[in-house]
Image (tube, rainbow, N blue to C red):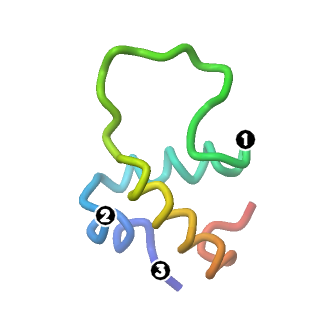
Amino acid sequence: YITAADIAEIVGCTEQTVYSILRLYRDFGQANNPFRTRSRRPRTLDQGDLTYTHSILDANPSVYPL
């Protein structure tokens, strides 16, 4: 079992970012909100970070129960 704090430390973001991504994944099945308009601010995590986080969830579904 890996915690949100562990994931945040591994990928170099905040624990809140991890929880936000997990919530989006639970709600939309992806790490972003498909209904949100794009902002000009750069993303905190790049596609590699998102892919890595997704692989953790796939390998350990009990980490964040849906």
Q: How many marks?
A: 3
Relative height, residue 15 to residue 59 (above, below) = above
Q: Secondary structure at mark 3?
A: loop
Q: For the residue marked with disc 3, what is the amino acid?
A: Ile
Q: Secondary structure at mark 2?
A: helix
* Residue under label 3: 2
Quadrant where the C terminus sits is bottom right
* Residue under label 1: 28
Q: Earlier in the sequence, mark 2 or mark 1?
A: 2
Spatial CA span between label 2 and label 1: 22 Å
Q: Residues within 10 Å of mark 1 (few under 14, many from 20)?
A: few
Image x and y of residue 6, in percent: 35, 74
Image x and y of residue 46, in percent: 36, 47
Q: Secondary structure at mark 1?
A: helix
Q: Residues within 10 Å of mark 3 (few under 14, many from 20)?
A: few
* Residue pictured at 71% horizontal, 67% vertical: 65
Nearer to us of marks 3 and 1 is: 1
Identify which residue, 42 or 24, lies in the foreground. 42
Q: For the residue marked with disc 2, what is the amino acid?
A: Val
**Do the CB atoms of the residues marked 2 and 1 lie less than 8 Å apart?**
no
**Do the CB atoms of the residues marked 3 and 1 lie less than 8 Å apart?**
no
Single out the residue that lies furthest toward the front: 48
Single out the residue that lies furthest toward the bottom: 1
* Residue pictured at 62% horizontal, 80% vertical: 60
* Residue pictured at 59% horizontal, 74% vertical: 63
Spatial CA span between label 3 and label 1: 22 Å
Spatial CA span between label 3 and label 2: 13 Å
Q: Quadrant of residue 11?
A: bottom left
* Residue pictured at 56% horizontal, 71% vertical: 55
Nearer to us of marks 3 and 2 is: 2
* Residue under label 2: 11
